[in-house]
Image (cartoon, rainbow, N blue to C red):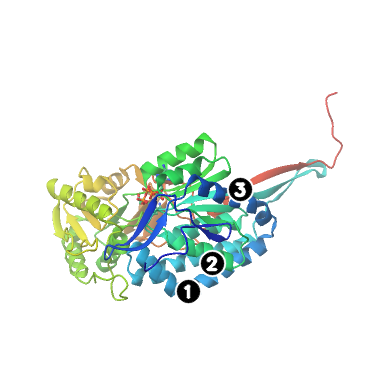
Amino acid sequence: MRAQPKASHFIGGVYVEDKDGAPIDVIFSATGEVIAQLHAATPAIIDKALDAAKAAQMEWAAMTGTERGRILRRAADIMRDRNHDLSVLETLDTGKPYQETSVADATSGADALEYFGGLAGSLTGEHIPLANGDFVYTRREALGVCVGIGAWNYPTQIACWKAAPALACGNTSVFKPSEMTPLSALKVAEILIEAGAPAGVFNVVQGYGEVGAALVTDPRVAKVSLTGSVPTGKKVYAAAAAEMKHVTMELGGKSPMIVFDDANVENAVSGAILGNFYSSGQVCSNGTRVFVQKGIKEAFLTRLTERLEGAVIGDPLDPTTSFGPMISEGQLNIVMNYIEKGKEEGARLVHGGERIKGDGFFLKPTVFADVTDDMTIAREEIFGPVMSVLDFDTEEEVMARANDTEFGLAAGVFTNDLTRAHRVVAGFEAGTCYINTYNDAPVEAPFGGTKASGVGRENSKAAIEHYSELKTVYVRLSELEAPF
Ligand code: NDP
């Protein structure tokens, strides 16, 4: 097996196997080849992981933030040193081109470890003076054991985006990757141990949805952070709410990107490509509803289709490849069904729309024009390389249409009118907005959605609020009076 790990799970600082768990075949989506075979966590494995995380938490939280931060920053350095090997593994795990994984996955994970490692020593409460010398102080305390559950599109990044703020605040973690991409999180766990994290601080268990569900409902767990679809998010949120657990929900979207007549067409086309075809369109924040003002519609479509001819589709391990396969045959079929619906409902196919023959799960980058708001492809998250181009006349009209969705993850605008750009962004019902760019996600900036797209924020100082809580301590220095 090309990418077989030492064992399926990483618990208490070591690899652990239990072959009684349901088998998980890891498939390289460019060839259909099975590259590793793992097992889902049994109840005994889940128990062991939660026990390990619980046992490690007090000791980890008792270290100074500076000490915890040093370990996280050391882990970031190791990840950067091994970027090539980690990127190859990520490409095998996800099928995403090495051209992408070498700059956007382990590197993004390392950024999160470095950033939160840097913040760890400065996480404090505050002093609040009261009358007569009395005062209140707050302690910023860890929540306890945090469960992370990941989607399959950015396995290394998701593991680190959840682990880094959790660990910086003194929590410990059990992470369950998607069963389709189980490999990279194990490497993150290995690296954290190598960097000096005590055993049990970050654990990885594999499995399908039921393993995630068992983690979410366990009383040892204080917080759940999920990256996944809206239907799964609703289930996980409800299960966590039953025990009043903290949650962060990073869910799906159907985000609008608005291109006004006065926009730089070349930049707008770049934004539409970045916001629809990076990672073969398997990105939650993608701007898949591209509203183009009528005056530049044809110019936009012409340049877009010309530039799509430049996509290099093929072996994702080849550094010249810029467009890889879908994660799985199942996902490819879901996307093909949406393409059929788009045609049936009268959208005009202007590029792609077909599977590429072979053993891999390749699909051409696809663009529909003349899409209307009621079409299925304009309403539902496709999670594949399918762009819908819609026409509009006025700003007022397009804003109402852009916001007419249950989702609220991201939104973007391309215009050279500075005033309009800020007005439009203020009007978007979305958590993450872009002006003349799309899909940037630096660790310094909060990331997350509104409406059905999620709860809470990842990254930036905002994430600290979601991985710690304040304890308020009243201190009386003056005499204490009582009514009797
Ligand atoms: P899913 O919602 O199908 O799964 C997400 C994770 O939840 C998987 O690990 C899954 O396990 C697990 N899971 C499924 N059911 C349960 C349950 N009842 N309790 C606990 N865990 C469960 O999403 P996908 O993996 O298909 O990922 C694609 C989705 O993720 C898209 O909607 C996309 O928009 C969203 N996403 C959001 C991002 C964001 O930051 N907002 C970023 C990336 C993706 P299993 O896979 O074994 O079913």
Quote the CA–CA distance across marks 3 and 1: 30 Å
Residue beneath disc 1? 82
Give x and y (percent) for residue 70: 63, 67
Q: Residues within 10 Å of mark 3 (few under 14, many from 20)?
A: many
Residue beneath disc 3? 144
Q: Horizontal placement of 235 versus 78: left or right?
A: left
Q: Nearer the viewer, mark 3 or mark 2?
A: 2
Residue 191, which numbered label?
Answer: 2
Q: Residue at x 61, y 48 (%)?
A: 144
Quarter holding the N terminus is: bottom left
Q: Secondary structure at mark 3?
A: loop
Cβ atoms under marks 1 and 2 closer than 8 Å: yes
Q: Residues within 10 Å of mark 1 (few under 14, many from 20)?
A: some
Quote the CA–CA distance across marks 3 and 2: 22 Å
Residue nearest the observer in this picture, 215 or 414: 215
For badge 1, the amino acid type reads Arg
Q: Residue at x 42, y 59 (%)?
A: 155
Give x and y (percent) for residue 291: 25, 53
**Which residue is the extreme one toward the top?**
484
Residue nearest the observer in this picture, 386 or 137: 386
Q: Residues within 10 Å of mark 2 (few under 14, many from 20)?
A: many
Give x and y (percent) for residue 364: 20, 62
